Image (spheres, rainbow, N blue to C red):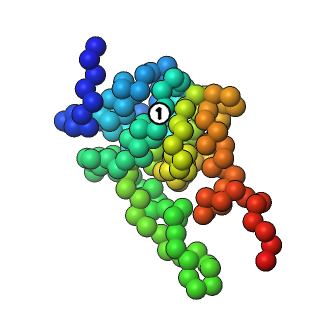
């Protein structure tokens, strides 16, 4: 079937009770179509097993704030809307403040399994991880996930590899 490439798909498909989603062996256009229309405010488990294309655009869609955020019947808690993972520092270098996180498909994910997920654009993995502020379980399949997802785990907040800075 011909899959539309437009970002406008009308009313989202709301699945307010869906907690687990597995996307496997989908080509990029179909994966984009599915993720653009789903509104899943209780998603806690996400498994991606994709290969072939560069799925960087999928990260952009997963981390993009919902066009129509969850309704009052399926609210996100205030703890899910506020997160300190991006912060500023005071003059002493102490982290301060939080900012409002716009709800997106990744906002509530606690468990992430990447069995195949090619994304070669620099910064993609960090953006992906940053959109998952409540992530407590991470499974990466060596050899099937782009190295950027491993490298991002070994970077400091400035994107520099950990352990490469020289002592003053």
Left or right placement of residue 27 versus residue 67 in this view: right
- Give percent across and percent down for residue 69: 29, 49
Marks counted in the figure total: 1
- Give percent across and percent down for residue 102: 37, 56
Residue occupying the point 48% across, 26% down: 53
Residue occupying the point 41% across, 59% down: 101
Which of the pair 125/35 is nearer the observer?
125
* Badge 1: residue crowd in 10 Å (few <14, some 14–19, many ≥20): many
Left or right placement of residue 118 versus residue 2 in this view: right
Residue occupying the point 45% across, 49% down: 107
Depicted 150 relative to depicted 21: above or below: below
Residue 132 appearing in the image: no
Which of the pair 146/45 is nearer the observer?
146
Which of the pair 64/160 is nearer the observer?
160
Residue occupying the point 63% across, 49% down: 152
- Give percent across and percent down for residue 160: 65, 59
Residue 82 appearing in the image: yes
Picture quarter with the C terminus:
bottom right
Could you say which quadrant of the image residue 4 lies in?
top left
Give SS at disc 1.
loop
Residue marked by disc 1: 55
Instruction: Pick out the residue farthest to the left.
Output: 10
Picture quarter with the N terminus:
top left
């Amino acid at each position: 079937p011909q899959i539309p490439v437009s970002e406008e798909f009308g009313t989202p498909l709301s699945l307010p009770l869906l907690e687990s989603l597995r996307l496997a062996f989908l080509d990029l256009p179909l994966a984009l179509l599915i993720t653009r229309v789903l509104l899943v405010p209780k998603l806690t488990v996400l498994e991606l097993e994709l290969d072939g294309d560069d799925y960087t655009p999928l990260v952009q869609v997963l981390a993009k704030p919902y066009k129509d955020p969850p309704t009052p019947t399926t609210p996100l808690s205030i703890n899910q809307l506020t997160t300190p993972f991006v912060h500023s520092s005071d003059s002493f270098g102490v982290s301060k403040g939080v900012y409002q996180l716009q709800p997106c498909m990744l906002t509530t994910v606690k468990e992430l399994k990447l069995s195949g997920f090619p994304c070669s654009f620099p910064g993609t993995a960090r953006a992906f991880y940053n959109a998952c502020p409540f992530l407590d379980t991470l499974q990466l399949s060596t050899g099937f996930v782009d190295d950027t997802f491993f490298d991002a785990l070994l970077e400091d907040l400035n994107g520099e590899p950990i352990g490469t800075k020289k002592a003053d």
